[in-house]
Image (tube, coloured by chain):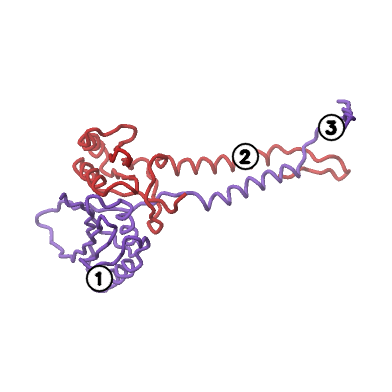
Amino acid sequence: MAGSVGGDGSDPEFQVAPMIDVLLVLLIFFMSITTDQILKVDKSIVLPLAPDAKPRKVDLQNQVVVNIDWNASENKAVIKFGQQICEPLETLAEMVKPMKEKNPKLQMIVRSDGEAPAVEVQKVIEQVALGGVDDISLSGVNRNN
Amino acid sequence: MSKKPRRRRSSDTHIGFQIAPMIDVVFVIMLFFMVMAGKVQKEHELNLKLPGSMAPDAAVETVEETQINVLESGEVLLNDELLAEPGDQKLNQLKATLIRLKASSDVAKSKVVCTIVADEYAHFQRVVDVLNALSVARIENVTFEVPVQ
């Protein structure tokens, strides 16, 4: 930002255009960050650490997420497909199947708590496979907070 | 303290735009974003390939399968050989072995197929540790199974 200073020693003037420039840059920054994280936010799940894995490619058209929220006190996993809780778990395959038929490129992202037992993840993968999806990726994070 | 400051008359006040504080604020915002950018938690992906179907007349390529066991205790075994103790999160020995395996299979132009066999109650974090090691070795044909006991 710069104010123009007259050669005659008058006060600097406020320039609107550079101000708008800066605001637009900030706006674009926030827009790009928001797009990057739109699938990610589910704070109840503590994802496992995987620092050497490749960063996830965001493809909102072809990706769907299933969340496995491990409740250690009840020794129970809550499986959510979008906002819908899969109870019983077999409903997951029923929900996935028509989506796969509609979009053959469908990729399933499994986001599970690091503390969850492997068998819970296996059950979800089994249901996803029954739904016809073979492109599955497990989520981790680059660092712990 | 007893004397109250006099108010200026409104006609004397000149509210002009101050460049210096504006630049200050912009720099502070910039610094904030620069610092926060390094601390952003990003999501990474670890891909699995499920066994699929193939045409009956297609040529069958024989591959050597490597099995990695993840025990409930946290121990990791590669083809029944213990390569990581429960506390070993970095799995350096496993990574080194997998890198050698990948290099030798590349030379032999063969495919490495890896199956992670986890105990039912092994922590998912431990499975991801192994997947992370496979990712370092650039082994992409990975499947995951939990034998029901």
Q: Residues within 10 Å of mark 1 (few under 14, many from 20)?
A: some
Image point 25% across, 67% down: which residue? Answer: B82
Q: Nearer the viewer, mark 2 or mark 3?
A: 3
Contact (Cβ within 8 Å) of mark 1 with mark 2: no
Amino acid type of disc 2?
Leu
Q: Count residues near mark 2 (Cα–Cα under 10 Å), then give few for <14, some for 14-19, many for 20+.
A: few
Q: Colour of chain B?
A: purple
Tag 2–tag 3 contact (CB < 8 Å)? no
Tell me how far mark 2 sits from mark 3, CA to CA: 26 Å
Q: On the rendered structure, is A37 left or right of B108?
A: right
**Residue B3 drawn above or below residue B86:** above
Tag 1's secondary structure?
Answer: helix
Quadrant the N terminus of chain B occupies: top right
**Chain of the residue under the numbered disc 2 shown in the image:** A
The label number, if any, that marks residue A23 in the structure image? 2
In the image, is residue A27 above or below residue B105?
A: above
Q: Which residue is mark 3?
A: B14
Indicate the secondary structure of the residue bearing disc 2.
Answer: helix
Question: Looking at the picture, how far across and down is residue B81, in whole percent?
Answer: 23, 68
Q: Amino acid at mark 1?
A: Ser
Figure colour of chain A: red
Badge 1 or badge 3: first in the primary sequence: 3
Q: Residue type at mark 3: give it.
A: His
